[in-house]
Amino acid sequence: MNLTNTVKTMWGAISFCGRKGLYILLVALLSGPFFNNAFAQGSLSGGLQTNGNFFVRDTSIGAANTPQYDNLFSGYEGWLNLNYSNFGFDLGLRFDFYLNSNLPDPQAAFTGQGIGNWFIKRKIHKLDITAGHFYDQIGSGIIFRAYEERLLGIDNSLMGLRLAYDLSDNWKVKTMLGRQRNPFGSNGVVSSTYKPIIASLSFDGYVPVSDDVQLAPGGGVVNRVLDEESMALIVADINTYAPIDSFIPKYNVYAFSLYNTLTVKDFSWYIEGAFKTNEAIVGPEGILVDKFGSVIMTNLSYSRKGFGITVQGKRVENFILRTSPNEILNEGVINFLPPTARQNTKRLAARYNANTSELSEWAFQVDLLFKPAKNINAALNFSNITDLDGNLLFREAFAEARFKNLGTTKKWTTTLGLQYQEYNQDFYEVKPGVPNVISVVPMTEIIYKIDRKKTIRTEVQYQHTQQDFGSFFYVLGEFTIAPSWSFSFSNMVNIKPRKTDERESYYDVSVGYTHKSNKFTFAWVKQIEGIVCTGGVCRFEPAFNGARITLNSSF
Amino acid sequence: MRILIFSLVILLSVSACEEVGPTINIIPPERKVLVEEFTGVQCVNCPEGSEKLETLLDQHGENLIVVSIHSGFFSVPHATSAIDFRTPEADALDGFIGPVTFYPSASINRKLFDGENSRLVNLAKWAGLIQQELAEVSPVEMELNTTYDASTRNLEVSTSLNFFEDINQPVHISVLVTETDVVDSQLDLDGLQTDYVHKHVMRDMLTNFDGQLITNATIANSPVVNNFSITLPNEWDELNCAVVAYVHFVSPQFDVLQAEEVKILQ
């Protein structure tokens, strides 16, 4: 069998047999007559990520009343990726398993396993073909983004066909057709798909006007077509409405986007405008409304050595784009609206976050980075988010200075920071009548390098607030022996509690060990609970108390 | 010869008189749909769910039976609450049908619908799935009768079931009491309402939370009668109380086959 025929056979098998075709292909690769020589020339890579959670009931913090705390006591999830390249093909396969896992839903136990992702990719001259599951986005993701955040339970890959064609060196056109993966389908199926169909067409270009001026324009359209079953649910729901609220829903929605990045020397200006045609979306009153949606977003940045500034603005109105309006929470989300606020990483500074409000938002942000002295890096950030009626949703001012190698020794790095936040908890968490959370967080991080291998890192933060749970104090100590060991301890104490009579401590003790490409971590974690209400649905994120073991491995 | 002729006449008469009987069409019993709504006084979005169910009750009338189950974190009473709607059975049902992971959510005949990963579905799907279930045929007919003694507040409940087909798995019956129009505190999108009218609140069960076993293998056209009783607590207004009974599987299927509801005082 020559190579051409082999490839044709494989393509045929895949085209006609779907996933079975993939198995045939793998079997052919591993056992075919060319295995001894051809297979050996290919490259195989992959990785394994597994988590084990061991639940220990602690009613004092609400770590109770879920199946894991009541009777299961443990839950596991894992992903094994295999990627193989040969004959110009890229093949990928991912085995997913969830055993009594609370990752899909923090209050439930999900068990299921199987092939969660597979793809076959081949570039034929200027045509790039991908069949199977793929991740991609159009522009900044406003009209389409398929991505994976597995530890958040998000994996909305598109299952279908992706074709990308290079019109020239600088221009590319792309189409994607398929159905979105439903990662946690009924009866433990990890590879089912939502029924509505998604189709897209987009282009991206690059225009070097001169040495100093470049353009990177692009645009796209996404079409989602509802299936009969989803439409029947929508119709039945609308039939319960008063005549004034009733409307005729549409099967098709089209979302259009145009974007461009203009670069002039040290300046860069990105602008994207998108709109979507009328369709049934869940409105602010919790019932379906027939609305047109729009987004406009822009970033203007200037950077040179030691200085950078970015100004961002975004306006969003009724831009909910899902496989169908029947889906809630993380289900069936087709697009991604980037938040216009700082992504904080420090524990207390990251307690209150402003996700983009899909129905109504005006957002503005300035981010400034500069070096006032040789050993000092400074950052300033300000963001302000309101709804389209001008009601404040979120405001943050943040300042940070990082001092490196101060004094006579080069062993110390010290970071000082201060954050001020106003957070509309009523809006983001749907807690009617609660006042805005006003929080002030001073924080510091000190890194001391004992020698070339050993490092100590400490963090101290204090969150002053008279709302929500009240004030917190947080301390972290971490000792690292490169390249193998790390030990850390942190404690978050509700120092001025408003919801409990006693000060509650939420601590975390962890040990990490790395040997070559294997990394093991063990942690004992006590984590605070929270309630998240979005899109007319409330979901309780329970507290966690117990042990976590993880293994990350790559080859 | 006479005897022969007489015998032939008799024989012909008998055969000529053979009756052609009427066509019997066994009409399957009308299907009633049970909606078990999981709710809580702390859940701001739940009044919207209750409102939706009232609209659906207006649409489908007696063919729809609603039970509001207060369970989980969102059902912890407010300081202003006069009544704690939680019951051990509500918590047990939360785990049995669910677990409930978002509010408001409801099970429609406890069915796991195509494409769903839970028997509990969100509000947007209730109307469509109820309609879908109403179109199904039930294999069982139920008659539900109550006798209430106002002096002792004792309630006797009798259920009579007639199956139209053999069912080769255990079938259970659950019986419970609901109370409607109970005024007490509830959080909604405008804040805490102290005069909210709660509907169809599950007050107690006359069976275990997962019902009472009727039979391990049901035979068609073999009527089954069961009797239950309860003494109503003084806090319940019997004028607003109803008995709900439903026939269902327990595992691995949980589907409700038929349901019935009668008011305690007609």
Image (cartoon, rainbow, N blue to C red):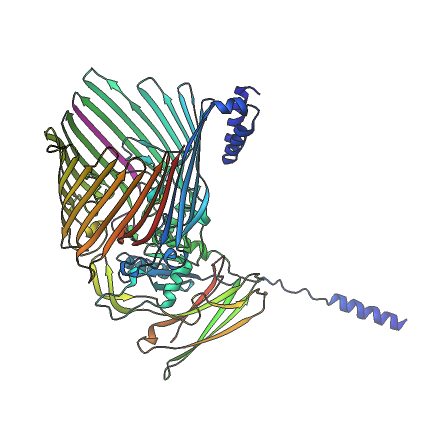
Please state which of residues B232 and B77 is positioned toward the viewer in this rendering. Answer: B77
Q: Residue at x 32, y 66 (%)?
A: B199
- Outermost residue, bottom direction? B151
Residue A285 lies in the magenta stretch: yes
Q: Quadrant of residue A177?
A: top left
Q: Position of residue A84 (x, y in %)?
A: 45, 28
In the displayed structure, A330 sits above or below B238; it is: above
Q: Is residue A289 left or right of residue A16?
A: left
Pick the quarter of the image with the C terminus of chain B.
bottom left
Q: Please state the extent of the stretch shown in magenta in the rendering.
A: A266-287
* Position of residue A470 measured from the top left corner of the image (x, y, whole percent): 17, 55
Q: Nearer the viewer, residue A77 or B95?
A: A77
Q: Among all residues in the image, which is located at the extreme front?
A: A451
Q: Which residue is at a point 57% across and 24% down the rendered structure image?
A: A33
Residue A119 at x, y percent in the picture: 44, 32
The number of numbered badges drawn on the structure is 0
Between A93 and A75, the one nearer to me in the picture: A75
